[in-house]
Image (cartoon, rainbow, N blue to C red):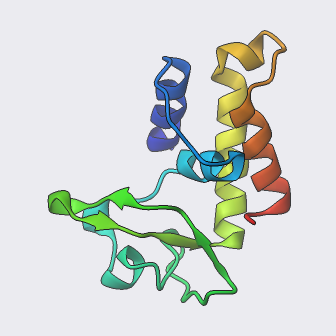
Amino acid sequence: MRRITATVEALVAGETRTSSSAEDSALALLPIPRGARLSALQARGAACVWCQARLTIETAVDLGERPGPGGVRIFPRGCDSCARGLADRVYRIHVANCRACLRNAPCADRAALRRLASEGAP
């Protein structure tokens, strides 16, 4: 929960990210366990980073390239169920902390997180 809150706090503080799409943006907001805590299967995307379920191309949600331990890049993936559940939690934290959303001017992250939580990843 602290990592989710820290992610949202970074966004509220004005840190910027670039993303090719709203879905990628929402997926980038989902915190994953630290690289050192991931199994080899999780680090290479063969198992869900959250529940450790084995993944196939059809069941995997690509979470994008991320920094791993020792400067190595990892390519984590998650199952749709975990990604949707976490997106819902991050969405709730986001709308309670985002300056734009609190002013009734919903931001792009809010819309992307809501879509990911309700529809799943593309």
Image position of 65 (left or right of 14): left
Q: Name the residue at 57% across, 44% down.
A: 19
**Relative vertical location of residue 120 with respect to residue 20 in this rendering, above or below:** below
Closer-to-camera residue (23/31): 23
**Residue ranking furthest to the front:** 20
**Residue depicted at x 70% and y 71%:** 80
Residue 50, given in percent of the width and then of the height, sits at 51, 68
In this figure, what is the number of numbered marks?
0
Q: Quadrant of residue 113?
A: top right
Foreground of the two, 15 or 79: 15
Q: Residue at x 65, y 62 (%)?
A: 83
Residue at x-position 64% and y-position 21%: 97
* Whole-percent x, y for residue 76 in the image: 45, 69
Q: Is residue 85 left or right of residue 24?
A: right
The percent position of residue 62, horizontal first and vertical second, equals: 57, 69
Determine the residue located farthest toward the top in the rendered image: 103
Image coordinates for residue 17, horizontal then vertical, percent = 50, 35
